[in-house]
């Protein structure tokens, strides 16, 4: 497992230097201040001098005790009874002073996942968590390859943790919550076919790779789609895959 030492003091002192401070209206600041005063989330404090947070993607975040507990105090939105989507929380409550850089945003999503995972159940939904991370990672890999890379996709890998945990929160917890119980075979076939069509269409306008290399590239892309086809086993996974795809990878 690789270890990524993140100290909040470094995050604030260094990472946010390159961040573009976002304009936050007074109402949002007032809401944030009110939440901070009213919230008492001390049960989430760490008593360790240093806390290590191991993630499912192989990274480990490191926080000093005072820095971690400061996060708990200053970001009560991470502990709402009914969690909101991580994008919504980040753009509403992060004002550029902390977690304001691209790397800072990655860390925010990882922390969101860390706290929400405790609420959802760490072991109870381990299988669903693993499957969703695999699915989202392959969607990310598909578009990363189509676009020949880019920093966006690297940052997405850490943020996928947050997206996954929110999906787990939405996962039907009881059988009577399963409203759409019909066979999704045809719907999934159409979605998978649309991904293969996207690969074919992109290949037609791709002149960076030619000849046999293009044939191999197309096979590689379709192999990712094959893996998605195997991972999407029910309506829940299909809907979450489509939502993640269309929310994060639209480009023209």
Image (spheres, grey):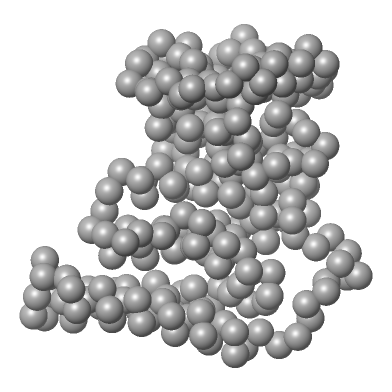
Instruction: Give the x, y percent position of residue 208.
Output: 11, 66
Q: Residue at x 91, y 70 (%)?
A: 176
User: Quadrant location of residue 193?
Assistant: bottom left
Instruction: Give the x, y percent position of residue 186.
Output: 60, 90
- Quadrant in which the N terminus appears: top left
Q: Is residue 53 left or right of residue 223?
A: right
In the image, is residue 50 above or below residue 226? above
Residue located farthest toward the front when viewing the structure as drawn: 26
The one nearer the camera, 195 or 237, is 195
Q: Residue at x 39, y 72 (%)?
A: 224
Q: Residue at x 56, y 73 (%)?
A: 231
Residue located farthest toward the left when viewing the structure as drawn: 211
Instruction: Give the x, y percent position of residue 185.
Output: 62, 88
Q: Residue at x 80, y 63 (%)?
A: 172
User: Quadrant location of residue 213?
Assistant: bottom left
Q: Is residue 85 left or right of residue 24?
A: right
Say how many tags the image has: 0
- Quadrant in which the C terminus appears: bottom left
User: Quadrant location of residue 77?
Assistant: top right
Residue 51 seen anywhere in this rendered image of the structure: no
The one nearer the camera, 170 or 221, is 170
In the image, is residue 42 above or below residue 246? above
Instruction: Give the x, y percent position of residue 199.
Output: 31, 76
Residue 182 seen anywhere in this rendered image of the structure: yes
């Amino acid at each position: 497992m690789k270890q990524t030492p993140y100290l909040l003091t470094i995050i604030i002192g260094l990472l946010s230097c390159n961040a573009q401070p976002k304009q936050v209206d007074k109402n949002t600041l007032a809401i944030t201040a009110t939440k901070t005063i009213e919230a008492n989330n001390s049960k989430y404090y760490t008593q360790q001098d240093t806390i290590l947070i191991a993630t499912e993607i192989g990274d480990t975040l490191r926080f000093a005790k005072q820095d971690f507990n400061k996060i708990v105090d200053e970001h009560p939105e991470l502990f709402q009874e009914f969690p909101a989507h991580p994008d919504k929380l980040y753009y509403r409550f992060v004002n550029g002073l902390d977690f304001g850089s691209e790397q800072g945003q990655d860390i925010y999503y990882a922390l969101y996942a860390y706290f929400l995972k405790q609420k959802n159940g760490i072991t109870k939904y381990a299988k669903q968590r693993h499957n969703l991370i695999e699915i989202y990672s392959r969607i990310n890999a598909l578009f990363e390859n189509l676009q020949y890379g880019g920093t966006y996709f690297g940052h997405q890998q850490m943020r996928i943790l947050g997206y996954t945990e929110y999906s787990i929160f939405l996962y039907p917890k009881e059988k009577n919550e399963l409203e759409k119980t019909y066979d999704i075979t045809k719907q999934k076939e159409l979605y998978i076919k649309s991904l293969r069509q996207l690969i074919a269409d992109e290949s037609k306008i791709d002149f960076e790779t030619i000849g046999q290399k293009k044939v191999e590239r197309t096979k590689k892309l379709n192999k990712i789609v094959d893996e998605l086809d195997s991972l999407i086993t029910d309506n829940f996974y299909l809907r979450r895959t489509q939502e993640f795809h269309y929310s994060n990878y639209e480009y023209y």
